[in-house]
Amino acid sequence: MLKELESGDWEEAFKYAQSPDAVIGEKVALDGFTREGVAEVFNSREGENDEDSWLIWGRLHDGRFFYLEAWCDYTGWG
């Protein structure tokens, strides 16, 4: 796992990547992904509870590209 993804916040955010809502592209595997599957991070932004979302995009070990957005408020992660 990449060092920048080791925090508990990224752990929670990536739980939503295991069953993605949509994958952009043609003939792409619709499988979810985990932090361990991330080969390269192009850019990311740490979020803040009840404020900004956690955002990240990059490339997976299987060659797919990904984008993940997750947020957390007083009700939990979403």
Image (tube, rainbow, N blue to C red):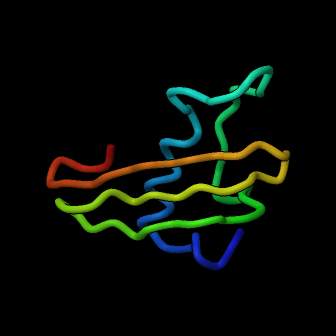
For residue 72, which quarter of the picture?
bottom left
Screen quadrant of the C terminus: top left
Residue depicted at 55% across the width and 42% down the height? 17
Q: Where is residue 67 in the image (x, y as percent from the top left)?
A: 56, 47
Front position in the image: 20 or 63: 63
- Is 10 placed left or right of 18 in the picture? left
Q: Position of residue 66 (x, y in %)?
A: 64, 46
Q: Does residue 26 appear left or right of residue 69 in this picture? A: right
For image coordinates 49% across by 73% down, the residue present is 7
Question: Which image quarter is the N terminus in?
Answer: bottom right
Give the total of numbered labels: 0
**Can you give x and y, in whole percent of width and height, for residue 32 in the image?**
65, 36
Give the image location of residue 35, x and y in percent. Answer: 64, 58
For this orientation, the residue located farthest to the right is 62
Seen at 45% across and 58% down, the residue is 55
Residue at left offset 31%, top offset 52%: 71
Residue 37 versus residue 24 in the image, above or below: below
